[in-house]
Image: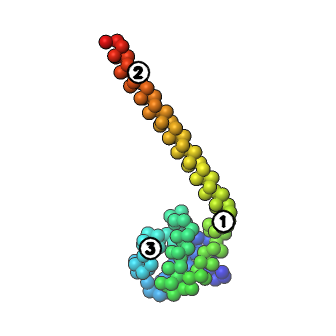
Amino acid sequence: MSGGPAPDYVGFGWFLKTQRVRRGLSIDEVAKATKISPALVGALEEGQSERLPERVFVLNYIKSYAQVVGLEPDDAVSRFESIPEAPRAQPFDPAALEAARRERAFSSLFVALALLGAGGAGLAAQAMYELALKLGHRWGG
């Protein structure tokens, strides 16, 4: 990326802002066209990565922004992904995802059964206590 700032969030934001200004668009016009809040458009242009949401949303924002200002969306995303500290896509391993899902399901089932058992034991104890009170009252009276 010669001719501009180093590849970082600020440099990427500068690139976006430069493209917007060249086309005579305001932040509000870009926000309205992309349905991205003006605050998030500003965060993108200022390179304020701490104000940006998760990666998947940012990529969609960049694509929308690029289309509005006349850039090739995939090129804009590639430029963003060239930032060393930019969040990377997580590898997709269906088998690992399924194993994690099953583990969560088993854990949830175990917790539900434990709570049900504890609740049942509590109800049984309450019933025994009430029965003892009734029988005790009858015997004492």
Left or right of 25? Residue 102 is: right
Residue 132: mark:
2
Q: Which amino acid does the dot numbered 2 rest on?
A: Ala
Place residue 84 in its image quadrant.
bottom right
Residue at the location (58% across, 70% down)?
9
Q: Which amino acid does the dot numbered 1 rest on?
A: Pro
Residue 40: mark:
none
- Give the mark, 2 or 3, whose residue is nearer the N terminus: 3
- Give the mark, 1 or 3, whose residue is nearer the N terminus: 3
> In front of the other: label 1 or label 2?
2
Above or below, 18 relative to 124 = below
Task: Report the residue marked by disc 1.
Answer: 94
Q: Determine contact: label 2, label 3, CB under 8 Å.
A: no
Check disc 2 and report its element: helix, strand or loop. Answer: helix
> In front of the other: label 1 or label 3?
1
Please name whichever residue, 79 or 102, is drawn nearer the observer in this view of the structure: 102
> Could you tell me how far apart the alpha carbons at marks 1 and 2 are, in whole angstroms?
56 Å
Residue 10 rendering spot, x and y as whole percentages: 57, 71
